[in-house]
Image (cartoon, grey):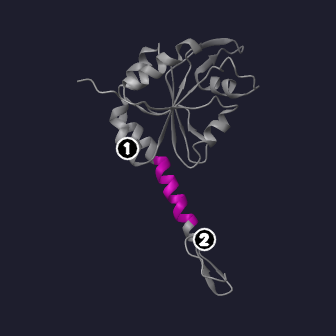
Amino acid sequence: QEQSVQSNIKCLNYPSSFELLLRHFKGKIVYIDVMASWCKPCLAELKEYEKTDDFFKKNDIVRLFISIDEPKDWNACLKRLDERLLNGYFVTYHRPENSVENNKFSVEVEKLFVTYDEKGNFAGLSVPQFIIVNREGTIVEYKAQRPSNPEELKNQLKQYLVKQEESKKKQSQSSHQTKRGCQVTRSHSPPGC
């Protein structure tokens, strides 16, 4: 008996900038996969995601798939993601035809996978590309580990989980202040302080 599987991929509206896209995930670590449905290495990596599913879920790490497929192939790309029962978010690199907004997103994303020669001429594109964005929305790894290297990827991501925990401890320690004899903490503020 065949079961119908609901997609766990959420399609995002085309953003006007990369920064605006990342704001959607503020406070979370984001693992970006720049990929295409026609790219054999990209498809091979999709098969490897299950090795990190529990780690991503436990640590609330977001997967963001950015497809460089042509508009006519967007559904094929989504189908590839659905076939692997992946979860995460999906956005396209190519601007939709009906989009009239002048935006920077495609130019900014190009920097992640397009290479140029020393004269600035197009030299090629390289996918898949894996990128890690920290909780503040800053790219911290332009050449992140691949899903096919699950232990190395987890260790790489742990660096940013640990940095977040250290930051929380420092904030907690500095948030205890004395004001007019009252102790003020972030979680509990006595009346009148």
Name the residue at 64% across, 23% down: 110
Q: Is residue 175 above or below residue 116?
A: below
Q: Is residue 121 above or below residue 58?
A: above
Name the residue at 60% across, 71% down: 175
For the residue marked with disc 1, what is the amino acid? Phe
Q: Position of residue 174 (x, y in %)?
A: 60, 70
Instruction: Classify 10 Å Cα crowding around label 2: few (below 14), some (14-19), many (20 and above).
Output: some
Q: Which mark is residue 55?
A: 1
Q: Earlier in the sequence, mark 1 or mark 2?
A: 1
Quadrant showing the C terminus:
bottom right
**Magenta stretch in the rendered image:** 159-171
Quadrant showing the N terminus:
top left
Q: Is residue 147 above or below residue 171?
A: above
Instruction: Classify 10 Å Cα crowding around label 1: few (below 14), some (14-19), many (20 and above).
Output: some
Residue nearer the viewer, 119 or 32? 32
Q: Could you tell whether 79 is left or right of 27 in the image?
A: left
Query: How far is disc 1 from disc 2 in space, using C-alphas?
Result: 30 Å
Q: Among all residues in the image, which is located at the extreme left?
A: 1
The chief SS type of the magenta part is helix
Q: Is 166 one of the magenta-colored residues?
A: yes
Q: Position of residue 128 (x, y in %)?
A: 49, 22
Q: Which mark is residue 89?
A: none
Residue at label 2?
A: 175
The number of callouts visible is: 2
For the residue marked with disc 2, what is the amino acid? Ser
Q: Is 192 one of the magenta-colored residues?
A: no
Circle 2 SS class? helix
